[in-house]
Image (cartoon, rainbow, N blue to C red):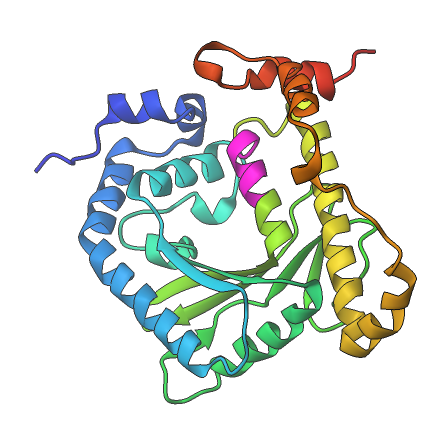
Amino acid sequence: MASVLDRKKFFETYKVREAFDDSGLSWDTLAAIYDDYEERKLDLEKAADELQEIISKEMKFNVHSIHNRCKDPEHLIEKIIRKVGVEKRQKYKKINEDNYLEIVRDLIGFRILTLSKEEWYRVHQFLLGLHKNDQYEIAMAEIPRAYIRYGDRDIFNHTIHKEYTNKGYRSQHYILKYKQYYCEIQVRTIAEEVYGEFDHFVKYPYRENNHFLHRYTSVVAELLNSVDEIISTCFQFGEEGWSDVEKYFKKDSYNNWSRIEKNAQNIFESKIPKVQDGEIDAKDYMNRMFLRKG
């Protein structure tokens, strides 16, 4: 029976034709993986929801949010091609429909988001303890890793394996096995999540070598890291500290925009470049307000 994976449409959608040609992978093998994964996807989604229920039930402290997802079938094929044809990852070289569940370990993915960096440690201890609970079929399949940037404040000490990078991505990764499926759990702050989503949208994986995007994603990464540091400092003060330093801010005053004359506000708004239907021309606005040449 012919695979439902359309080769022509796939390469029109994903920019991996050259990588596929360099990979030595068989399209028939990729199609077989795709078909097998499609058949299993409902079972994986069920397993992901079960694991989320377990985590929510056993976690006795609050985090910002917990989400799960199962990898899209076409994204799985794109990833395999990229890992072999671009990144030259040896473990993917002999992948097929019989072993891909063992090789690709983020078919199920979780994000656990926290408000501050320091909350990571409680999540870390929780996940390490979860696989020791005999009540569930959960095992820690790989050594946990923290991806951090050179120059970052080290909150991890010797509690987790650290991988340093000059990129802006920051996160902690855990590979668990639940029943027969592997899953990747990513733990990060809300600010780190903002960077990850931004980077994934504009740069990863096809524009990693774009110098403009490398520069601007690096700036965004440092700005968001500063946000994390401010939040961490605030939490470290605690309620008693907040009360102690509040006296230094009692004389602060702030603009009350509701009292600004309507005429002045109209003048300000008139300077924002617009296109039809009153929508802001974002490109022109960026050029005028932020970007500079030279």
Q: Quadrant of residue 159?
A: bottom right
Residue 274 image offset from top left, x and y in percent? 55, 13
Does residue 240 appear in this view?
A: yes
Residue 82 image offset from top left, x and y in percent? 46, 35
Name which residue lies at 65% across and 46% down: 169
Looking at the rendered image, the quarter that the N terminus falls into is top left
Q: Is residue 234 above or below residue 21?
A: below
Q: Quadrant of residue 80?
A: top left
In the orientation shown, which residue stands out farthest toward the left?
A: 1
Name which residue lies at 66% across and 25% down: 265
On the picture, is 237 further left or further right than 48? right
Does residue 211 appear in this view?
A: no
Q: Which residues are magenta?
A: 196-205
In the orientation shown, which residue stands out farthest toward the right?
A: 248
Does residue 137 show up magenta in the picture? no
Q: Is residue 105 above or below residue 263?
A: below
Q: Quadrant of residue 234?
A: bottom right
On the picture, is 3 further left or further right than 163? left
